[in-house]
Amino acid sequence: MQVIEETGAEKVNIIAHSKGGLDSRYAISQLGMDKYVATLTTINTPHGGCDMVDFLLGKVSEKWQDKISRKYNGIFGKLGDSAPDFMAGVRDLSAIRMKELNEQMPDSPDVSYRSVMSVMKCAVSAGFPLCISYLLIKKLNGANDGLVWAESAKHGQFRLIDKKGIRGISHGDVIDLMRENIEGYDVREFYTGLVAELKTQGF
């Protein structure tokens, strides 16, 4: 709403990474934001959930879940979250929970949906812990970015980032999380290209 007020535009184009894509879908579907959104482009978003979450929740005891949750809630609290709930966020990413959420978040006919996904080519494409989760997800589902498997990221018009070589692009690389130069992938050109494409299409 601030962008619309500042620019005078009728609608905005949202580009959202990871769980931000799910938050944006919820806002469009359930909070009346469909009137203000022209397009939603999700980047490495687990629309179909993460089977790894269901697997780990079934293996990790409640005691350890509480311990991990307290640790992350403490971090998020220091970052400004007044009511952090780490485990609620984790459970929302399970494949079982996402099936329920997808039924609650139908696409708006007034919004153009598109999705983009990157994949790691091997475990050494990223550091810990993505190198470990990559192997687990590969065994459970197949190609993935260390957190999200490729099929789960499909929503609307879909495309996979085509990168040559063995390095691959992890869940963090696609937003330049580690500020690392990756041969064959220019993060600035990637996002500039997304925006240029939207402009060419009239958005």
Image: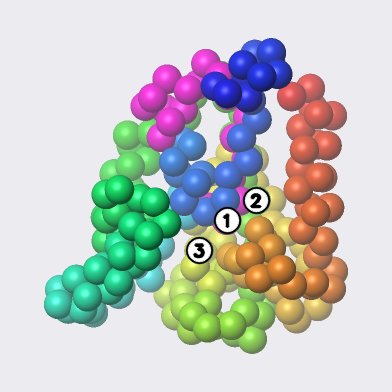
Which residue: 39% across, 51% down? 80
- Residue 8 in percent (x, y) is at 69, 13
- 3 and 1 marks in contact (CB < 8 Å): yes
Marker disc for residue 44: 1
Residue bearing the label numbered 2: 116
**Furthest residue in direction left, as rendered:** 63
Say whether residue 87 is visible: yes
The quadrant in which residue 29 appears is: top left
Distance Cα–Cα, label 3 vs label 1: 7 Å
Which residue: 66% across, 80% down? 125
Mark 1 surroundings: few (<14), some (14-19) or many (≥20) residues within 10 A: many
Of residues 80 and 92, which is closer to you in this image? Answer: 80
Mark 2 surroundings: few (<14), some (14-19) or many (≥20) residues within 10 A: many
Task: Give, as a single range, the part of the protein colored magenta.
Answer: 26-45
For badge 3, the amino acid type reads Val
- 1 and 2 marks in contact (CB < 8 Å): yes
Quadrant assignment for the C terminus: top right
Of residues 201 and 142, which is closer to you in this image? Answer: 201
- Residue 127 in percent (x, y) is at 59, 82
Residue bearing the label numbered 3: 148
Which residue: 80% across, 72% down? 181
Distance Cα–Cα, label 1 vs label 2: 6 Å
The answer to whether residue 91 is left or right of residue 166 is: left
Disc 1 is placed on an element classified as loop
Distance Cα–Cα, label 2 vs label 3: 12 Å
Quadrant assignment for the N terminus: top right
Disc 3 is placed on an element classified as loop
